[in-house]
Amino acid sequence: MKLVLLRHGESEANFENYWTGWLDVALTEKGMEQARTAGQKMKENELLFDHVYTSVLKRAIKTSQVALEEMGQLYLPVDKTWRLNERHYGALVGKNKEEMKAEFGAEQVKKWRRGYKEVPPLAAENHFDRRYDQLDPRLISHGESLEMTVERVIPLWQDNLAPRLLDQQNILVVGHGNSLRALTKYLENVPEDQMDTIDIPNAQPIQYTFNDQLEIIEKSLL
C-alpha cells in the first residue's frame, strides 16, 4: 500500500517570510506551478489513489486540487481535516521571522521554530471563521509546540489513515511543513531531539510503501 505525503506549494507567507500557522493564505504563482509539477511526478510514477486527506487551509486544498487534476484524479473523495493544519504559531502568526530575530534574538526564534516542547507566545484570542464551529473549543489551542502538533496529528493516523491502508487503499495526504513532520516523526519513530533532520520541502511528493503489518518497506522522494 502507498501513502504519499505532499506539502503545499510555495505560499504568500513562504515568499514573504512570516509565520502563518492557521492563517489562511493563498499559493503564489510559483506555488501553483510546484503543485502542477508534483501532480506530473505522481502521474509519471503511475500512482492511483483511493482517498485524499488535506487540511482545511486553502494553500493545501488548492495544492491537492491542482495535483489531482494533473493526475486525472479529481474525482477522488477528499477529506478536509483541521488535524492536518499547520502548527498554530500563536501570537507569532503574521510576524516577519527576521523582524522577530531583531526583537527577540536569533536563539529565541530558533527555539520557537525548532524546540520540540517550546510553546510560542499564545494568541490572546483566536479569530477563526465557521470552518471550526463543529470542533470542541477545547481542541483549539492558542499556540502549539511541535509536541502538541504531533499529538494532534496522531489520531488521524490511528482513526483514518491506518485503517484505509490496512484495507489495501492508497492515500494522498496534502498538508503543511510541521503537520507532515509530525506524521513523519510518528511513522519513523524519530527521536524528539532529531526532529530537525526531517525535511519536508514544498510540493515534493514523499512516498511510503507499507506491508500488511503497516511496516515501512520503502521510502522515496519522487
Image (cartoon, helix red, strand yellow):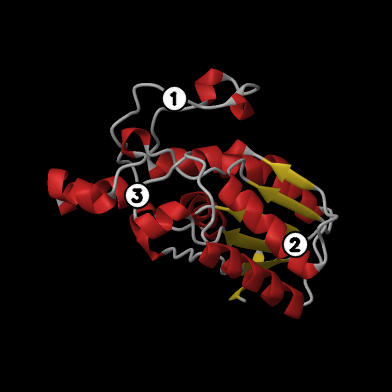
Residue shown at the point (56%, 69%) measured from the top left: 204
Q: Position of residue 34 (x, y in %)?
A: 57, 69
Residue type, mark 3 in image: Tyr
Identify the residue at horizontal 78%, vertical 50% (top origin): 164
The single residue placed furthest to the front in the displayed view is: 29
Q: Which residue is mark 1?
A: 126
The image quadrant of residue 134 is: top right
Find the distance from the CA under tag 2 to the CA under tag 1: 32 Å
The disc, 2 or 1, on the residue closer to the chain's N-terminal end is 2
Q: Secondary structure at mark 3?
A: loop
**Relative height, residue 45 to residue 54 (above, below):** below
Disc 3 designates what residue? Answer: 18
Amino acid type, callout 1: Asn
The residue closer to the viewer here, 147 or 76, is 76
Under circle 1, the secondary element is loop
Residue at the (18%, 50%) spot, across then down: 101
Q: Are marks 1 and 3 in contact (CB under 8 Å)?
A: no
Tell me the distance, in whole angstroms, between the alpha carbons under discs 3 and 2.
Answer: 28 Å
What amino acid type is highlighted by mark number 2?
Leu
Q: Are marks 3 and 2 in contact (CB under 8 Å)?
A: no
- Does residue 1 sit above or below 91 in this rendering? below
Badge 2 density bin: few <14, some 14–19, many ≥20, Cα 10 Å: many
The span from disc 1 to disc 3 (Cα, nearest Å) is 18 Å
Is the residue under label 1 in contact with that under label 2 (CB below 8 Å)? no
Q: Is residue 167 left or right of residue 100?
A: right
Secondary structure type for disc 2 = helix
Question: Would residue 81 be found to the left or right of residue 139 on screen?
Answer: right
Q: Disc 3 or 2, which lies upstream in sequence?
A: 3
Please identify the quadrant where the N terminus is shown: bottom right
Find residue 203 and report its image quarter.
bottom right
Residue at numbered disc 2: 68
